[in-house]
Image: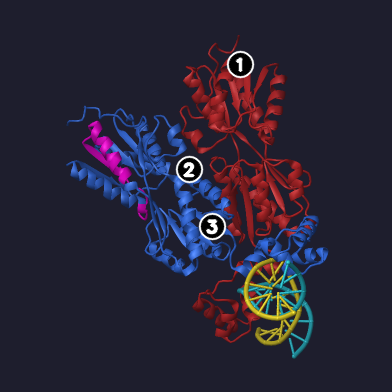
Chain colours: A red, B blue, C yellow, D cyan
Amino acid sequence: MAATIRDVANASGVHVSTVSRTFSAPHLVNPATRNRVLAAAEDLGYRPNRVARALTTGRTNNLGLIVADIANPFFPPLIKSAQAHARERDYHVFVADTDEDHLVEEELIQTLAKQVDGVLLCSPRLGNRAIERLAADIPLVVVNRRVKGMSAVLMDVAHGARLAVEHLLALGHRRLALVTGPSGSWTSGEMRAAAAQRAKDAGIELVILGPNAPTERGGLAAAAQVRRSGATGVLAYNDMVAIGLIEGLSERGVSVPGDISVIGVDDIVPGRLNRPKLTTVAMPTSAAGRTAVDLLLQAVGAGEAATPALATLETSLVVRESTAPPPSGGRT
Amino acid sequence: MAATIRDVANASGVHVSTVSRTFSAPHLVNPATRNRVLAAAEDLGYRPNRVARALTTGRTNNLGLIVADIANPFFPPLIKSAQAHARERDYHVFVADTDEDHLVEEELIQTLAKQVDGVLLCSPRLGNRAIERLAADIPLVVVNRRVKGMSAVLMDVAHGARLAVEHLLALGHRRLALVTGPSGSWTSGEMRAAAAQRAKDAGIELVILGPNAPTERGGLAAAAQVRRSGATGVLAYNDMVAIGLIEGLSERGVSVPGDISVIGVDDIVPGRLNRPKLTTVAMPTSAAGRTAVDLLLQAVGAGEAATPALATLETSLVVRESTAPPPSGGRT
DNA sequence: ATGAAAGCGCTAACAC
DNA sequence: GTGTTAGCGCTTTCAT
């Protein structure tokens, strides 16, 4: 059986409250006794029981982080930076995967509710209504979504989409396509609006193809439509979709970037490994993880009185090898 | 403030213990009162507080899962299958990343100790001594490691390594290299022993190159040595290393598989996306996740009396495009 | 600076 | 079948 605070108290000849203080408010206890207590604790291998502590204080010093799919390479950098940042603030973060299932997502949040002080919802699949309801139970911060009255960290994908369209335009492309993501995705909506507007401003046609699964498979499946669309420049929902699309295109004898240019979004590792190396809109995922933790901790600290904050992080275009001028030189 | 068991008791005119029973042992309470309690609970939005429950029962219904690097594509399938499998058994799994740091790993296990009923150590960086010590605090199951007195799930990488060597031999390669992983890695040791033995049996030379970081970068850095070694067939510690190696080789004008054949281990997604598509030793990661959860739950249930179990999962060779006969046809 | 005591939300004997 | 009572291990007033 593990040592409890009481064992330490007995061993060091003080009362439990003194032991408690040496761990949670060391400055309140006489250095001499403190050392005695610490020695006894060390001796017995005592470690404060965080569960018991949580029960009295109401704080667990844990955060939850929920993602739809941990296998999506977009998330790991965010998770890692969130964990590292939280650790520096003496918080642990527990990650859970919903398997893209919004029911699981909801259940997870509710179960987590009492075991963590707040949860980070990354690219949630849940609707805004549900999220608002859940926020009554526990401080929530969303990443890549805008929910009324809730802190959020957004990545300016609209700006990224504009940059992508401009890059394609500058290369001489005159017929563009957007391969969208899942229908509920905030990011997908933002991209669509921004890209469409930018294309319209340039008097260029942008064909919308979707919705698609946010995976390689989704891109693969969209290849036929892309080819039929006649577009020579395409912006994909994310890098995985772009990679799948390039593969699908190449299966059909269409060369990238020779015949069609493809731009992804996210800047994940597989995109850098891909041949051709992917031109992409880089998302500041590590920064997002840190910022999200900051906002969440802020919300946790403020309790009911929390003022929702909005952080919008910049995106940028990384030009690599999957984009080039269109075959004909740009003029039809 | 969230409703407690006491609120429900008041609202439904019964005592707290009855409320407790309706949730933890429903069959012990009269259907009529049970319904009354349930209705009141529903009404108040009551949900049992798992932390409080854990304090009395000593069980949290949570499992911990520790990985060295969540960004390593090897882990996500394992994590996902473990989470799904655990959920079916009414357990949640919390994932934590140690950032390849064994100090963080140890601290994490200790912190987790009281908040979960057991932890899964996947490809730990900690030494066996440390792991054995930690096992006194909490049920532990290791994946990809053999620790005395502890349940483990192993993947038969030795067999995989032999298959890989045989494949290379069959293609006509007569000088082989093994690009190893980190020095503490159990997997790396197994591979090395098996590959060396198999090569020796065939009267073939196997040069050992390493240790290397288990990453693309590690493979990239090993490219120069591989070239110098004169080997025409190489087995890499894992797919990421293989991918990096191929890249490094190609930077040096060495073609894969034209000049050198490369085999990876793991069968991760980026390997399938790579050009050339990677020939690799496939690891049964999803099965490993499920099996590990089973063994852990078994250990949790058994308490001190736990009999350590050993599960060895089969590996297989997936031949794709990164292997071919050596340039000269095989004879020197 | 330290001790005493109450209690966080729940479960688990033990009565009745 | 349900009520009573004692804690689980810790923090936190309130005294001293």
Mark 1 lies on a secondary structure that is: helix
Along the viewing direction, whichever of A206 and B122 lies nearer the viewer: B122
Q: Earlier in the sequence, mark 3 or mark 2?
A: 3
Q: Position of residue B240 (x, y in %)?
A: 42, 41
Residue located beneath label 1 in the image = A229
To the question of a shared chain for discs 3 and 2, the answer is: yes
Q: Residues within 10 Å of mark 1 (few under 14, many from 20)?
A: some
Look at 40% across and 59% down and name the residue there. Answer: B309
- Magenta stretch in the rendered image: B159-186
For label 3, the residue is: B64
- Say which chain tag 1 marks: A
Residue at 60% across / 26% down in the picture? Answer: A235
The stretch drawn in magenta includes residue B171: yes
Q: Secondary structure at mark 2?
A: loop
Question: Where in the figure is residue B146, as x and y percent of width and height?
Answer: 37, 58
Q: Are marks 2 and 1 on the same chain?
A: no
Same-chain check, marks 1 and 3 = no
Q: Secondary structure at mark 3?
A: strand
Which residue ends up furthest to the top in the rendered image? A332
